[in-house]
């Protein structure tokens, strides 16, 4: 929104420069002041620069209001703005820009989550509901990682309040919605060292009334009790200014001064603009910490979802209860033994739990067949890692865990499937898992053969080092208890 045309900008710049000119001519001030035209010039310059200063402030205020109303495209014009307002307007614009980017990011993630929903509808029905919760995880993740820190935002706000409004001290109280109390969050210039500021009930005291009545309250002589709460400072003047955004009170901005003050309309406008910005900052920070909490809950829901899937797969494969969990635990042990780090181990565990999720595309007639497979039946079995890839890839949260489901049937000598990868082309997690998968398969009864004894399995795995398996992984496996 432009509030000045460029012709007017030039004119106003010229006018705004007049007082500077008179400063530069300070040594000659006596002469200037003594001459009648000098006095007229100075007076005119003062009146006009005052007028110029008020306009951009109004523009900034209206931009701040739009921002508070959810219009993240709001920007303050940086035209013929006096120096101190220019800083303010620029900070405002930076903040608005970061909000706008964040909002765009959020919308993008939501679109991504919607697309995932379509793909996942094909997955097992019993876990469908939990999966939906989980999809929000990615969107929230992105939002949190770009969130502003509330403490930083409040410090910036209080710095602006004390510097620009020329007051001795200021503080922010945040509304605790559940307890209906205001709690001290941040201060500047306050002498509250070592003292807990007691929280204030909404409706009580000047701050509590400002929050309840949603208006600025002024106290000209702070009573003994209130002074006491503040650390017995000698403040004379106190303002409590509600921080409101989208119709909701977020907290109270307190202003303290040690002498009387007679604020101008400009001062009030400025306070108004800062209060709106403060409320927006608090609103955002709260939004993100709420999301932080649901993020944790969703991570738990996610793990529960995976375990639900793994159990459903075991059931279908006629595996015994807890089979997948044991295989996953043993895979993590071996992965740790070959030197994988904790973060990788999280993905290894998820990947191992889901290693055969692609088998849901294999018909029972093949999976549970008592004898050897025909060539056509093998073609179906060979596709199960590709199915796993197609099912899991669209889920951002599970993408890093894909190595095992996709590559667990590759072999060290390049004779495996689906891609015929060789040696270290095969992801390490998959090389580790392959050993555990075969150990587990041979130790279990299959419709087409008996379970093998542990000693026979060890011998078989040793014999496959350098053929089916990575020799270094086999070495670590044989050292395992
Ligand atoms: P699975 O039974 O879980 O076996 C996983 C892997 O363990 C097999 O991958 C193979 O590398 C190894 N393995 C399992 N059983 C034996 C065995 O008796 N001898 C040897 N030397 N290795 C064994 P693979 O071969 O790619 O098989 C993938 C899946 O295909 C198997 O999973 C199983 O579900 C199915 N399958 C494989 N062979 C047959 C079969 O003869 N009949 C039927 N019905 N299904 C089979
Ligand atoms: C300002 O610099 O104008 C205020 C900054 C803020 O409240 O974030
Ligand atoms: C498959 O492994 O992927 C089918 C059988 C298995 O690996 O357990
Ligand atoms: Fe498999
Ligand atoms: Fe398996």
Image (cartoon, rainbow, N blue to C red):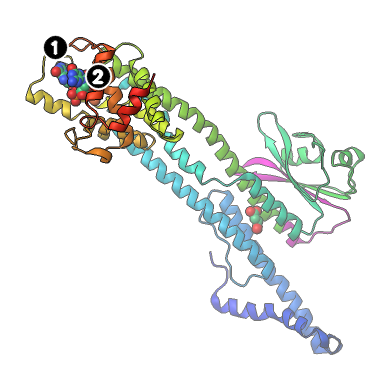
Q: Position of residue 36 (x, y in %)?
A: 83, 88
Residue labelled 2 has its Cβ within 8 Å of some atom of ligand 1:
no
Label number found at residue 459: 2
- Residue 366 visible (yes or no): no
Is label 2 in a helix, a strand or a loop?
Answer: helix
Q: Residue at x 14, y 11 (%)?
A: 370
Q: Is residue 133 above or below residue 236?
A: above
* Mark 2 or mark 1: whose residue is earlier in sequence: 1
**Mark 2 to mark 1: distance in Å?**
26 Å
192 within the magenta span: no
Magenta-drawn segment: 242-269
Neighbor class of circle 2 (other Cα within 10 Å; few <14, some 14-19, many 20+) is few
Residue at the right extreme, as displayed: 224
Label number found at residue 370: 1
Total tally of numbered discs in the picture: 2
Q: Given this view, does label 2 or label 1 mark the residue nearer the observer?
A: 2
> Where, quadrant-wise, is the C terminus in this rendering?
top left
Q: Position of residue 68 (x, y in %)?
A: 59, 49
User: Which residue is at the front of the view, 227 or 367?
Assistant: 367
Residue at the left extreme, as displayed: 375
Q: Are marks 2 and 1 in contact (CB under 8 Å)?
A: no
Is label 1 in a helix, a strand or a loop?
Answer: loop
Q: Position of residue 463 (x, y in %)?
A: 22, 24
Label number found at residue 329: none
Residue labelled 1 has its Cβ within 8 Å of some atom of ligand 1:
yes
Side of 290 where 211 appears, left or right: right
Side of 220 where 297 appears, left or right: left
- Residue 171 visible (yes or no): yes
Q: Position of residue 305 (x, y in %)?
A: 39, 24
Q: Residue at x 82, y 42 (%)?
A: 193
Res. 478 image quadrant: top left
């Amino acid at each position: 929104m432009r509030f000045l045309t460029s012709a007017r900008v030039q004119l106003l710049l010229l006018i705004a420069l007049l007082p500077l000119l008179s400063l530069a001519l300070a040594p000659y001030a006596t002469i200037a002041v003594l001459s009648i035209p000098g006095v007229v010039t100075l007076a005119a310059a003062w009146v006009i620069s005052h007028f110029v200063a008020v306009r951009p402030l109004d523009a900034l205020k209206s931009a701040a209001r739009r921002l508070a109303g959810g219009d993240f495209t709001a920007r303050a014009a940086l035209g013929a703005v006096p120096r101190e307002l220019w800083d303010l307007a620029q900070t405002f614009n930076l903040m608005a820009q970061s909000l706008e980017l964040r909002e765009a990011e959020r919308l993008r993630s939501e679109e991504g989550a919607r697309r995932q929903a379509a793909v996942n509808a094909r997955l097992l029905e019993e876990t469908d509901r939990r999966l939906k919760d989980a999809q929000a995880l990615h969107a929230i993740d992105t939002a949190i990682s770009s969130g502003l820190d509330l403490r930083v935002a409040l410090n910036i706000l209080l710095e602006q309040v004390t510097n620009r409004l020329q007051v001795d001290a200021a503080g922010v109280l945040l509304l605790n919605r559940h307890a209906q109390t205001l709690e001290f969050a941040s201060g500047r210039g306050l002498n509250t060292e070592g003292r807990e500021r007691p929280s204030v009930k909404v409706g009580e005291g000047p701050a509590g009334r400002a929050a309840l009545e949603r208006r600025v309250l002024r106290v000209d002589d702070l009573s003994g009790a209130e002074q006491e709460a503040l650390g017995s400072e000698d403040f004379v003047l106190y303002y409590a200014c509600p921080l409101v955004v989208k119709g909701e009170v977020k907290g109270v901005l307190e202003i303290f001064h040690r002498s009387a003050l007679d604020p101008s309309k400009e001062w009030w406008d400025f306070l108004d603009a800062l209060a709106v910005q403060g409320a927006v900052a608090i609103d955002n920070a709260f939004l993100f910490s709420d999301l932080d909490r649901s993020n944790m809950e969703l991570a738990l829901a996610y793990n529960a979802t995976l375990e639900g899937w793994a159990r459903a797969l075991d059931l279908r494969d006629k595996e015994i209860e807890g089979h997948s969990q044991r295989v996953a635990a043993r895979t993590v042990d071996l992965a740790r033994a070959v030197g994988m780090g904790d973060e990788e181990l999280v993905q290894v565990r998820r990947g191992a739990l889901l290693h055969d999720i692609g088998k849901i595309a294999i018909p029972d007639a093949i999976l549970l067949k008592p004898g050897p497979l025909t060539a056509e039946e093998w073609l179906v079995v060979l596709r199960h890692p590709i199915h796993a890839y197609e099912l899991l890839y669209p889920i951002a949260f599970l993408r890093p865990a894909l190595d095992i489901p996709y590559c667990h049937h590759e072999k060290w000598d390049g004779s495996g499937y689906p891609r015929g990868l060789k040696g270290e082309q095969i992801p390490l997690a998959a090389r580790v898992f392959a050993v555990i998968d075969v150990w587990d398969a041979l130790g279990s009864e299959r419709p087409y053969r008996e379970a093998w004894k542990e000693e026979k399995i060890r011998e078989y795995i040793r014999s496959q080092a350098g053929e089916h398996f990575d020799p270094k992984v086999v070495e670590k496996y044989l050292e395992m208890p």
